[in-house]
Amino acid sequence: MTDVSSSTSLRTHRCGDLRVADVGSTVTVCGWVAKRREHGEHLAFVDLRDHTGLIQCVVPGSVDVRSEYVVSVTGVVRLRPEGTENSDLATGAVEVGECAVEILNIAEPPPFPVDDRGDVDEVIRLRHRFVDLRRPRMQANLRLRAKVNSALRSAMDRQGFVEVETPLLWAPTPEGAREFAVPSRLSRGSCYVLPQSPQLAKQLLMVGGVDRYYQIARCLRDEDLRADRQFEFTQLDIEASFVTQEDVLSFVTEAVLDAAEAATGERPAGVARMTWAEAIDRYGSDKPDIRFGMELIDLSGVFAGTEVKAFASPCVKAIVVEGGASLSRSRLDAHTERAKSLGAKGLAWFRVTANETDGGLALDSPLDRFLSDDERAGLLATTKATSGDLVLVVADEHRLACSVLGQLRLDIGGRPVSEGPYRYLWVVDFPMFDGVDDHGHPVAAHHPFTMPNPEDLDLLETDPASVRSQAYDLVLNGWELGSGSVRIHRSDIQSRVFAALGISDEEAAARFGFLLGAFRFGAPPHAGFAVGIDRLVAIFAGEDSIREVIAFPKTQSGSDPMTGAPKPLEPGQLAALGLQPVPQKLD
């Protein structure tokens, strides 16, 4: 129990803190009326609620209060009469009797119940977020978030990091996502941008000798919204000097496991690790959900030299759906259409059945008659499928075949991200480049300041697609929690990477001059990472959308039903910024 009494407080105790040990004490509690029940003219019951919970208050006579009135109640704590205890409440063994009620403020009827019972349309909830936040679910989520933030801060402090705040008004950055622009009143025609991350600022801190930096950082990106993405998001942002990749993974692992222990009461055993290439090959994703099997199986050897046109591709991959042979033809057709929508030419399926003739296994599929005996036997032996299973096969280029089956794996066997167990995973050795641009230049997979793997430096000019980077992601239950990398601190390597990306010296100076200029004055080797706090807390809270762990989120369309944002500026405001309204297009 927590006693919040003080000479200046309106209350002596919080509603949810009263227990049997308080029996006989005169207390004052404050909160919102959850329910009022009249028992004739001489007795009334008021259930009073604050963020800690609910207490039953017994008022002699009638009391004129309604749901969500803000009141102060003074009375004596006593045991509930035998047989009236409420085991569903932490305060269910006691009540406050002989109560005097003071109305602190009246309230209109709320637009929806505040008891977490029943579903409420999200737009209605967000329009009245100030009421929605009173619900036990939202109170618990926000307090869990605070607990996670505290654990992360403590872990970074313990590991010798110093908290430094970086600017929210910044110059455009080269991180790829669209940025929110902030027009300048004093420099008309010019804009700041809101930072996508403190990436460049924290690297400058390393040049400045801060050595180990962290920040619970607010970041903004003008990207389409979804369950795990908002315009505004918060991350644990870190950077450290004179460290290796292993050091950073250790720092972050310590912080995240501390946060998990604070949130769940249990400390995870550790964080697994696999390379990016292994993740793609086994799960078809660079953020694999390793809570369940159904891993991708390579059938390329089985169908090497095949005469089946559908399998004449560089890569043939499969997944086994246990018990999937019972799926209807319409469901199989739906999976085929799904595969095509993801870019595959098609999807082959094989039901595995018992061969009544010899007791072995047989394949039921439109393609079975085209297979050779060796291919049929090889498929069964390699997949280890048994009677009643379903084998789904995609043949294409390796990356495409893996990604299509990886998504089908999630479609068929996936589960909500918030559902346990929690399975953490480090994915390391990402490619340095991902595809090419319209001019044939490689595109940086992360950002142009990521250090290549030292073993692959000689491939930068000759085979950039094969170059691995010193970049790493942290994944939890199939959600990317964050990413980081060892940074380039040597000008000769930075110049080679810029050349590979097709960035001229002039363009580099224009886009990154302030950072490159700082590096000329002694940049130490450094590396960093950022953990998405919204995503981490959502999983711990059992939520499948980060909107449920953010106090004032935007809808999926980017609007704020509560404030009406975004809104047009007044003509005077536009004029002060040197802006003119754009005429609306008529349909």
Image: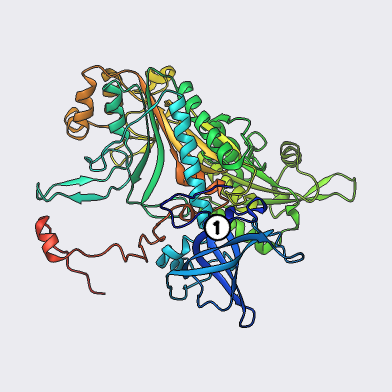
Number of numbered callouts drawn? 1
| Nearer the observer, 352 or 181 | 181
**Is residue 93 visible from the viewing direction of this image?**
yes
**Residue 513 location in percent, x, y?**
19, 29
Q: 314 or 50: nearer the eye?
A: 50
In this view of the protein, which residue sits in the foreground, 479 or 30?
A: 30
In the rendered structure, which amino acid carries the disc numbered 1?
Val
Q: Classify residue 199 by image quadrant.
A: top left
Residue 519: % across, % down: 24, 21
Which residue is at a point 44% across and 67% down the rendered structure image? 123
**Element under disc 1:** strand
The residue sitting at 29% across, 42% down in the picture is 195
User: In this orientation, which residue lies closer to the viewer: 381 or 542?
Assistant: 542
Q: Residue furthest bottom?
A: 41
Name the side, left or right, on which 171 lies relative to 1: left
Decide: is 463 above or below 15.
Answer: above
Where does label 1 land, which residue?
27
Q: 299 left or right of 240?
A: right
Residue 263, picture quadrant: top right
Residue 174 x %, y %:
28, 38
Say which quarter of the image contains residue 316.
top right
Q: Badge 1 local density, few (<14 within 10 Å), some, or many (20+)? A: some
Q: Quadrant of the C terminus?
A: bottom left
Residue 397 image point, x, y percent: 51, 40
Way the structure is coloured? rainbow
Side of 264 where 341 appears, left or right: left
From this view, report whether residue 342 is shown above or below residue 238: below
Residue 398 visible? The answer is no
